[in-house]
Image: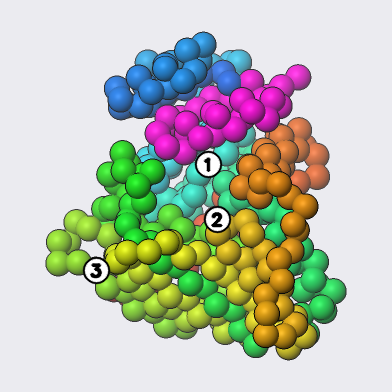
Amino acid sequence: MKPRIAFIGLGIMGHRMLTNMAAHGGFALLGGWDPSPAALARTRAAFPDLPLAETPESLIADPAADAVYIACPPKAHKDHALAAIAAGKPVFCEKPLGVDLADSRAMVERAEAAGVKNAVNFPFADAQAVNAMKAALDAGALGALAGIDVRLHFSRWPRAWQADAAWLAQRAEGGFVREVFSHFAYLTQRLLGPAKLVHASVRYPADPALCETHFLARLECAGVPVSVAGGAGGLGPDRIEYTLWGSKTSYRLWDWNRLQSATGAQWRDELTDIEDPRQDGYMRMLDNLRAFLADEAHTMPSFREALSVQDLVEAILRSG
């Protein structure tokens, strides 16, 4: 039977998840809730058969719900997650886990104490490009790691497709350190184990309500230096790159899903048989989620793993 999913939050990520679950075909879309009339109207237009609940509590408590997906802004994750945990429902939450570390620790502890299954949406958990890098790393094909570089730049933040999510521009919950770098913090720890922050600096605009415009950070992971730089502003294409510098082979992950390798002066494209790497990533994430819900082998990150990412992210932001 297809697991029946309750959607808490019907904004950008909720709408994207609805679209991808419908395309995947392995899930039943039970119902949705959002406090925004505009989000509800968009959902009605795109998914006219999806029932819309009057309150999140009624949707979470619905006996037909097999799992709860939380896609609201991160400050509200705790309340909805705790409600789902109290109802004994598996929880699938968007990242970041939260913005308040005490709240997130409470989520982790409550879920673990209750024995409720929990996972966070870090698609690098089963992306083909990441799996290829990890296999090469584990096999020793990279040789000695000289370092890892993470480079992020956005001509506009929030990005144009995020324009309706005004909270992403706010310091309280948004910013690209939380929204984007968290993926690469997770990826680094997936590849090499726990990371620690050595140094960071963050630049904020004069308006105290607005999120960061630039940041630099140095991490250490299994003795490997990890150099991170990010910023927003200026004309040009966005830049999203993650590079493993090895003594035998280096790997470069760019534009989220595209992989290159180098043994000399030129990068060589890898995984060229994947027609649409982005869509392939969505479908693999949903395969992984379905396995998680079915108690089958999976690599979905837990709340606790997401908490370790949040620890790094919030430590960086505090340095500003």
Q: Residues within 10 Å of mark 3 (few under 14, many from 20)?
A: some
Q: For the residue marked with disc 2, what is the amino acid?
A: Ala
Q: Nearer the viewer, residue 191 or 151?
A: 151
Mark 1 vs 3, N-terminal side:
1
Q: Mark number for residue 204?
A: 3
Where is residue 270, by image quadrant?
Answer: bottom right
The alpha-carbon separation of the residues under discs 2 and 3 comes to 25 Å
Residue 296: give x, y in percent of width and height: 80, 39
- Closest to the camera, between mark 2 and mark 3, is 3
Range drawn in magenta: 1-28
Q: Residues within 10 Å of mark 2 (few under 14, many from 20)?
A: many
Measured along the vertical axis of the image, is residue 25 above or below residue 216?
above
Q: Is residue 188 left or right of residue 104?
A: right
Q: Quadrant of the N terminus?
A: top right
Residue on which the image places disc 2: 306
Q: Is residue 221 left or right of residue 233?
A: right
6 magenta-colored: yes
Q: Is residue 300 left or right of residue 171?
A: right
298 magenta-colored: no
Q: For the residue marked with disc 1, what is the amino acid?
A: Cys
Q: How many marks?
A: 3
- Closest to the camera, between mark 1 and mark 3, is 3
**Residue 129 appears in view:** yes
The alpha-carbon separation of the residues under discs 2 and 1 comes to 10 Å
Q: Mark number for residue 12?
A: none
Secondary structure under tag 2 reads helix
Measured along the vertical axis of the image, is residue 5 above or below residue 215?
above
Residue 152: give x, y in percent of width and height: 45, 67
Colour pattern of the rendering: rainbow
The alpha-carbon separation of the residues under discs 1 and 3 comes to 28 Å
Secondary structure under tag 3 reads loop
Q: Mark number for residue 93?
A: 1
